[in-house]
Amino acid sequence: MVSRGIDLFTKISIILAGIFVIIGLVFKYGYNVFLWIGIFTSKKHTRTTQIIKYFARKSTIFISLAITILILVFLVNVFYGR
């Protein structure tokens, strides 16, 4: 029963980590695309471009969060796993 719960925890955590990595990479490398969209939709640098710049700077937080989740999953599997 315990191992089944850990397997479920592992699957959910890995999916979460993958989502965080994707979000981080989109914000990091899709930054220029977002910026061009913001420039074309509004001639001035408005609030949307400021929000985009903010998330582009914070993209490393998402990636480091995903790495932390993967490390936690690994440790849980080592100590409570098979």
Image (tube, grey):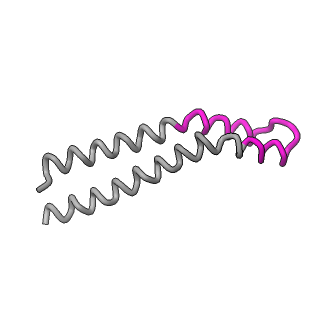
Image quarter in which the C terminus is found: bottom left
Q: Nearer the viewer, residue 63 or 29?
A: 29
Q: How many numbered tags mark residues here?
A: 0
User: Residue 63 at what x, y percent from top left?
Assistant: 46, 40
**Above or below — where is 33 with respect to 8?**
above
Image quarter in which the N terminus is found: bottom left
Q: Name the residue located 71 percent from the left edge and 36 percent from the top edge.
A: 50
User: Residue 68 at what x, y percent from top left?
Assistant: 35, 40
Q: Nearer the viewer, residue 81 or 29?
A: 29
**Residue 32: quadrant of the picture:** top right
Q: What is the chief secondary structure element of the magenta stretch?
A: helix
Q: Name the residue located 60 percent from the left edge and 39 percent from the top edge.
A: 55
User: Residue 35 at what x, y percent from top left?
Assistant: 74, 41
**Residue 48: quadrant of the picture:** top right
Drawn side of residue 25 relative to residue 10, left or right: right
Drawn side of residue 24 relative to residue 48, left or right: left
Q: Which residues lie in the magenta part?
A: 35-59
- Most extreme residue toward the right is 43
**Above or below — where is 81 with respect to 27?**
below
Drawn side of residue 56 relative to residue 61, left or right: right
- Most extreme residue toward the left is 82
**Above or below — where is 8 with respect to 54?**
below
**Is residue 43 located in the magenta-colored stretch of the structure?**
yes
- Most extreme residue toward the top is 57
Q: Name the residue located 59 percent from the left edge and 43 percent from the top edge.
A: 27
**Is residue 78 located in the magenta-colored stretch of the structure?**
no
Q: Name the residue located 20 percent from the left edge and 48 percent from the top edge.
A: 76
